[in-house]
Structures are given as C-alpha cells and as structure tokens.
Image (cartoon, coloured by chain):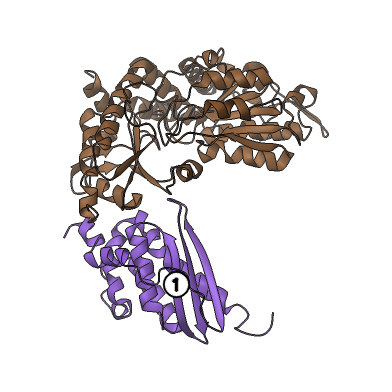
Chain colours: A brown, B purple
Amino acid sequence: MDTLTGVRADFPILARTVRNGKPLVYLDSAATSQRPHQVLDAVAEFERAHNGAVQRGAHLIAEEATEAFEGARASVARLVNASAPQEIVWTGNATQSINLVAGGIANASAGIGGAEAERFRVGPGDTIVVTETEHHANLVPWQQLCVRTGATLKWIEVDDEGRMRPDSIASVIDETTKVVAFTAASNVTGIVTDVAPIVAKAREVGALTVLDACQAVPHLPVDVQALGIDFAAFSGHKMLGPTGIGALWGRGTLLDALPPVVFGGGSVKTVTMETTTWLDAPHRFESGSQPVAQAVGLGAAAEYLMAFGMENVARHEARLAQIMREGVAQLPGIRLLGPVGDVAKADVLGLAAVVVDGVHAHDVGQILDDAGIAVRVGHHCNQPLHRRFGVVSSTRASAHLYTTEDEARAFVDVLGTVRTFFGVNS
Amino acid sequence: MSDLEQMYQQVILDYAKTRRGSGLVTPEAPSVGESHQVNTTCGDEITLRVGLDGDLITSVSWEGQGCSISQASASMLAEMMDGANLRTADETMEAFMALMHHKGVPLGDEREDLLEDATAFVGVGKYPARIKCALISWIALRDAIARATVGTEGSTP
C-alpha cells in the first residue's frame, strides 16, 4: 500500500526500539492498537485549551468543551453509520457497553423503567443466546443476567474451524429467545461473522440482537443500520483511540426505553424523594462526569479511520492475514486456529492465532519478544473457544492499518525458529 | 549470554522436560493439604499436594500444565521440598520470591545455598510478565502447607 509510509509516520511509538535496539514489530493490535499523533494531539489540545464542564457551564470554554464532546459523538456515529449521534452512548469500553445493555435488561426485569421498559423484561422460561466463540466480555454479562432473572443461557455451537454452525443458529434461536448476543468478528480465529442469517432468525422470533463489534469497527466497514442489529458495542483503544472510552450504539427507540444501570446526576429529567424519570439517550446512560478528553480522542480516531477509508483498512489487513496464515501453514508442528487453506477471501481479520506443538504460548511469545515482535499469549479472554479447540492457550499476532507486510513475514520467520530453540524439532 | 538465554538456561529446560513429582499421589501422612492455583493470564493451572508428618514434608506431588518456566519451577520445587522441614521450606520460599524480584541479578548471599539449582531462575526476574509462571507452584506449596496444618496448630478454634 503506497500510503503506508505516511501512515507509519503518524504513529510515534512505531519508531521506538525494544530489546537491545531492535525495531518494534507491533503485532498486538487486537489487544490494543497504537494511536496516531492526530489522536494524541486532539486529547492534548482539548486539555490545554478547551477543558470545561460539558453540558453544564454557561461560559465560553464550557461551550467549547460541549461542542468537542458532542462533535466526537457525531464522528463516531458517522463511522458506523448510526442514524443520529444520539444513538452513540459513551462508555468506558466495550465491556461496559455490553454490561450496560445486560444491566438495563436486568433492571427492566426487576420493574425499573416502567411500562416503556417492559419490552426488555426477561425471566424464567426465556432464553438468552450467545455463541461458543464469544470473548468473555460478551459471555459473562449474559450468564450473570440469567442468574439474576432466571432466564436460561443457550449458545450457538461452532465447527472445527470456529465458524458458527448454521444448523445450530437455526435450532438454538427459538420462540423463547429474548436476546441474541454475538461477535462481529472473532478475536481468536479472526472469522468475520455472517450477521444476516442470525439477525433474520432473531427478528423472526422477536429477539433483540446485541453485536460485539469490538474487533470489527477498528478493522472493517461497519454499517449498523444495514446490519439490522439492535445494539453494537466497541472500544476506543482498539480503534486507534484512547483507553477509558468506548461506545454503545443502539436503535434510538430502544435506547430511549432501556433503563439505565448507573444512576445519578446528568441523566435525570425530574427527581422527587420517591421517584425519578430519565432523560432520553444518550444522556440517561451518562450519569456523572464523563471521560471527555478521551471521547474527543476517540472522535479524532474515527475521523482518522474514515480519512483512510475502512475499505482500505480491510483490504490491507486481508493481505496481511494471507501472508501470516499461509506462512504459518507451511511451518511444521504449528497449528493455526481458525480457517486454514484459502484465506484470500476477506472474511478473516488480519490476525493469526497459533499453537506450537510441544511449546507453551508463553514460551513462544518470549522468543518473538526477543526479536522485537510483540504478540499476545494466553487465552485472549476466550477460554471456551480454546477449550473447543482442545487447547488452553495460543499465540496471536494481530495487525492494523499501520502493519507492514515485512512485519507479517517477520512473525512467520521467527515463529519458524521456536521449535528448534526448545529442542522439540523431532 | 543474552537475557533470553539467561532465562531459558539448560537446567530449566531439562527440569521442564523431565518432571519431578509430576502426577498426584495420595500421601500416607498424618496430614495432607492440597492447593489449586490458576494463572489468569494464560489459564495455566497447577494442583499441588503435600503430606506432612509434624514439621516434616514427607510428600510433594503435583499435576498441571503450563509454560517451561512454570513446569520447571514445579519440578524443581518437588525435588527440593520432598523431605524438607517446614522451616527450610519457608526460608527457601522466601529466598525464591526474593530472587524473582531481584531484576535478574543473583542474590549473592547465603540464600543461594538454600536455592541450589533454583538459582537458575534468576533470569526470570528480568521479565515481569513471567514471574507469576515461576511462582505459581511456590504459591501452591505455601497454600497446601497452610491447608495441611489447619487444625493441627493450636487447639482453640
């Protein structure tokens, strides 16, 4: 990609060296991405010149702060094609976004939110559906919702490559299903979910759909309206933005009826000693002071991604996926989790999680780290899928728009030396 | 020797490969304690069991899976602690923890005599993310001993 040189110069951290002067090869973007100076500068500029209490003050800098805060919301809304900025709720991260929906449903089930929240109620006899490929963040909140409400958790099973099985989608989602929560793209296999059949089935039975878009929004074009989903959760720090900020997108009509989880000031319409009514979304969910500078940074990140073009990000990463996955497939004694074979199809993220025969992921990661290559080791907050694959942990390389083809090749090359180092080459 | 070679010394790789005390046994001892520990980063687990006769450790066995550092550490621990008395176990544990937090520099004092081959773990101290790997079996040992001695020390509930 001819624009890549310019892109790399935008990310200051990519110029640093690690482990005895080796250039940093950052292949841990699925865990957290790096930030371009446009994001770092936007945060610093806000703090230096425009910091004020948002939506409260009657003075100039408070107005500027509010404008920056809401402008960022509009940028993020545009990135995912929300129909209005009010459909974007700021949260701390994707985990909090998902908990906001699950917690809101729990509160509705406990009678909070009145008649308008009745549509969210779940209880004994109802089912909540997840999938076997979920990150813990999109599994545990639903498990716990079931514990609280008496609803039953069911899950869509995956095949040996980690793809959600069509027969399982068809049989697990039924008339009792109230919520279907599923990932837009797996953080282990990299498989991009075919959303349409799940949404179609969920709609058929009147269930809400909650998309964990944490790995999708940073890497692929995501159009929440075209997908037909009801809620989508994503994190700022995985999409070139700061930590401590994430977003929940929801259909306006649903967000305006879902009870909040965090109660306090800034979210209320009227308060008496006995009762409270809430503002419309997003404010009903944004009690207390907000991570304003971080939101501004996330807005800048959304603008950066849009300027680059999400189609271009996806195309670049598909090429990197191909280099890594085809390269790994050539190495003896190394198993690739997820699709093998023809990965030229753009339905896999730019990542490769591998299991090295006879060598633990921690040890694999250490050898890569010594070569300056930063990867993730462990279960990547996805124990059930690893268990499904019959392993405890794996080593994952993951790219972003700033990753070069040479870096993808370096991962494959160094990975190829690991079994020799540990003497398991037999 | 590079940092990497210092961490993965041959003696460590050997202990990881040829495991001592691996496979849980049921000790014939007056008191038995067992501990299960998980490394939340990677999901690695260890179950370690001790048999105690008074203040003597008469049996150490374990079961688990993990990286070469954690396996070597458990393996060496089993060899060293089987037959040790509780006071030595305690002092060795303290010495090993001190070594882990010594940033890759040898302790350079009499504690090294207690640690014997375990001084080879010195290089782990340069990699903060790996200290837990080396410590997990020792944490399990301490917990297992505590469980074995519950009710045997002091009579007032």
Dividing the picture into quadrants, the one containing residue B63 is: bottom left
- Left or right? Give the position of A185 relative to A19: right
Between residue B130 and residue A143, name the one nearer to us. Answer: A143
Residue sitting at the far bottom: B54
Q: Circle 1 is placed at which residue position? A: B61
Horizontal and vertical percent for residue B151?
A: 63, 80
At 21% from the left and 43% from the top, the residue drawn is A414
Chain letter of mark 1 equals B
- Left or right? Give the position of B120 relative to B33: left
At 46% from the left and 79% from the top, the residue drawn is B59
Mark 1 residue crowding within 10 angstroms, few (<14) / some (14–19) / many (20+): many
Horizontal and vertical percent for residue B153?
A: 60, 83
- Confirm whether residue B129 shows in the render: yes
Q: Is residue A182 above or below residue B102?
A: above
- Left or right? Give the position of A300 relative to A172: left
On the rendered image, what quadrant is the N terminus of chain A found in? top left
Q: Amino acid at mark 1?
A: Ser
Between residue B124 and residue A122, name the one nearer to us. Answer: A122
At 25% from the left and 29% from the top, the residue drawn is A323
Horizontal and vertical percent for residue A226?
A: 52, 13
Dividing the picture into quadrants, the one containing residue A109 is: top right
